[in-house]
Image (spheres, rainbow, N blue to C red):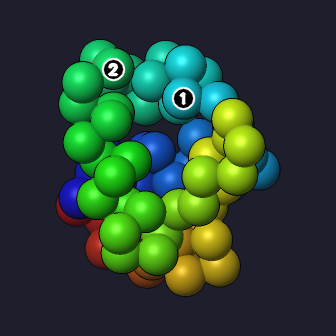
Amino acid sequence: MAISVEILKAASKGDKKTHIVYNANLNFDMAKRYLVMLEKRGLIEHKGNLYVTTSKGKEFRDIADGLDL
């Protein structure tokens, strides 16, 4: 869950996959799998060449941050 939260934080204002990879400290293969999973769950959207955290994703991120995992 921590990786998902880091990705959602990185994409909160919209960002390219490359920046998300570096900000979340991932490799491209892992980032691709997580981005697909987050997009299927409606937590992130792919708009052009940017990934943007949805309102549902922001809510999830805030709740998960509060869990202190």
**Amino acid type of the residue that numbered disc 2 sits on in the rendered structure:** Phe
Relative to residue 44, is residue 43 depicted above or below? below
Q: Is residue 25 left or right of residue 48?
A: left
Quadrant of the rendered structure where residue 6 is?
A: top left
User: Which of the labelled discs sits on residue 28, or is there none?
Assistant: 2
For the point 29% across and 47% down, the residue is 34
For the point 40% across and 55% down, the residue is 5
| Discs 1, 2 touching: Cβ within 8 Å | yes
Instruction: Count neighbours of disc 2 (C-alpha within 10 A) and say few if under 14, some if 14 to 19, many if 20 or more.
Output: some
Q: Can residue 2 be seen?
A: yes
Q: Can residue 11 be seen?
A: no
How far separated are the C-alphas under marks 1 and 2?
8 Å
Residue 22 location, x and y as percent?
A: 49, 18
Q: Which quarter of the rendering shows the N terminus?
A: bottom left
**Amino acid type of the residue that numbered disc 1 sits on in the rendered structure:** Lys
- How many discs mark residues in the rendered view? 2
Q: Is residue 7 left or right of residue 9?
A: left
Quadrant of the rendered structure where residue 3 is?
A: top left
Upstream in the sequence, badge 1 or badge 2? 1
Kindly identify which residue carries mark 1. 17
Relative to residue 61, is residue 26 depicted above or below? above
Front residue of 39 and 48: 48
Identify the element where label 2 is drawn: helix
Question: Among all residues in the image, which is located at the extreme right?
Answer: 13
For the point 45% across and 24% down, the residue is 21
Residue 41 location, x and y as percent?
A: 36, 75
Residue 51 location, x and y as percent?
A: 62, 46
Front residue of 69 and 52: 52
Q: Is residue 56 left or right of residue 4?
A: right
Q: Which quarter of the rendering shows the C terminus?
A: bottom left
Instruction: Count neighbours of disc 1 (C-alpha within 10 A) and say few if under 14, some if 14 to 19, many if 20 or more.
Output: many
